[in-house]
Image (cartoon, grey):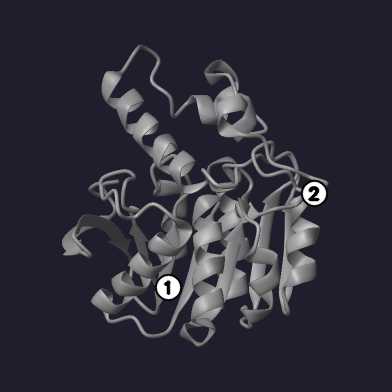
């Protein structure tokens, strides 16, 4: 993380930490459930933009707040966060949980966004292509679920027991489980409101994604007014870590 600048502020009663890199128009990137891979794979996105990566409340380096527990709570938090930054118009991207949050933000304030990137987003309930419940994945199998080549994901896990790593990951998974306690798959109402997403949208997906199966991509594309789908072969859920160059180049070309 040495290439990022760290920031911290109290927002909605939450000690909120975010990282920035680069300069230019703002690109907000919302992370997925686990922050353990870090964000160095995203640095190419900062070549001609100010890349802004906040840690969600109850995740990563940000503080805890029990009153932020539902998807709507997180979305309202991020609207306040954007106000805090003074960002009135921006590009927004997100991976997995972050993609879900980005879509929900786009539904509520479509005029605020110029372009939207949804990388293997969570949140959409696709009955004929469900995502596995996180609690159903045995911990030793997790790397094989996260990347097509398990060694890529495995490189982010400690080789010996690490209580700090374990505690941090358990906190993040617990926060996500609270968020999806009413519906493991996501938001049953999300499909009904996707028509409010009016900006051009890039759907980016790994063809071998076992966390958010690529079969969900068509469901998203059919719901969005202006969506381009790019599928990355031999790629799992952590697509920016597994295919850093092609994934970041695809996003950069789309945003330009």
Closer to the camera, 223 or 202?
A: 223
Where residue 76 sits in the image (x, y, percent)? 38, 69
**Residue 172: x percent and y percent?**
39, 38
Residue at point 67%, 35% (across, down):
132
On the image, which quarter does residue 200 sit in?
bottom right
Q: Position of residue 213 (x, y in %)?
A: 73, 43
| Residue 192 image-quadrant placement | bottom right
Q: Residue at the bottom extreme?
A: 111
Report if residue 129 is visible in the image. yes
Q: Dot 2: within a 10 Å radius of its alpha carbon, few (fewer than 14), some, or many (20 or more) residues?
A: some
Q: What is the secondary structure assignment of the residue under circle 1? A: loop
Left or right side of 79 for 125? right
Relative to 35, is 219 above or below? below
Q: Which is nearer the N-term, disc 1 or disc 2? A: 1
- Side of 21 where 155 appears, left or right: right
Which residue is drawn at the image coordinates 76% and 66% (left, top)?
221
Which residue is most to the top? 160
Front one among 5 and 199 = 199
In this rendering, position of residue 172 left or right of residue 194: left
Q: Which residue is most to the right? A: 128
Query: If the image is split into quadrants, where does the C terminus sit?
Result: bottom right
The residue beneath circle 2 is 215
Picture residue at 73% right of the left edge, 39% below the top: 208
Image quarter of residue 84: bottom left
Q: Secondary structure at mark 2?
A: loop
Q: Is residue 241 above or below residue 255?
A: above
Q: Position of residue 240 (x, y in %)?
A: 55, 48
Compute the Cα span from label 1 to label 2: 33 Å
In the image, residue 252 above or below residue 200: above
Which residue position holds label 1?
Answer: 48
Label disc, if present, on residue 159 of the rendered structure: none
């Amino acid at each position: 993380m040495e290439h990022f600048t760290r920031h911290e502020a109290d927002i909605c009663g939450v000690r909120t930490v975010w990282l920035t890199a680069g300069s230019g128009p703002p690109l907000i990137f919302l992370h997925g459930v686990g922050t353990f891979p870090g964000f160095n794979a995203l640095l190419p996105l900062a070549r001609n933009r100010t890349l802004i990566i906040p840690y969600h409340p109850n995740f990563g380096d940000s503080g805890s707040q029990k009153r932020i527990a539902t998807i709507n709570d997180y979305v309202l938090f991020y609207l306040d966060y954007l106000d805090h930054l003074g960002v009135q118009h921006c590009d927004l991207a997100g991976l997995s949980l972050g993609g879900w949050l980005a879509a929900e933000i786009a539904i509520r304030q479509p005029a605020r966004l110029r372009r939207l990137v949804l990388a293997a987003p969570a949140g959409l309930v696709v009955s004929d292509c469900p995502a596995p419940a996180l609690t159903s994945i045995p911990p030793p199998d997790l790397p094989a679920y996260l990347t097509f080549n398990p060694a890529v994901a495995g490189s982010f896990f400690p080789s010996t027991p690490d209580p700090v790593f374990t505690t941090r990951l358990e906190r993040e998974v617990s926060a996500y489980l609270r968020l999806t306690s009413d519906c493991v798959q996501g938001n049953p109402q999300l499909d009904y409101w996707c028509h409010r997403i009016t900006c051009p949208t890039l759907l980016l997906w790994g063809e071998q994604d076992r966390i958010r199966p690529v079969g969900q991509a068509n469901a998203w594309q059919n719901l969005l007014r202006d969506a381009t789908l790019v599928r990355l072969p031999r790629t799992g859920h952590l697509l920016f870590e597994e295919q850093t160059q092609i994934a970041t180049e695809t996003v950069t070309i789309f945003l330009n």
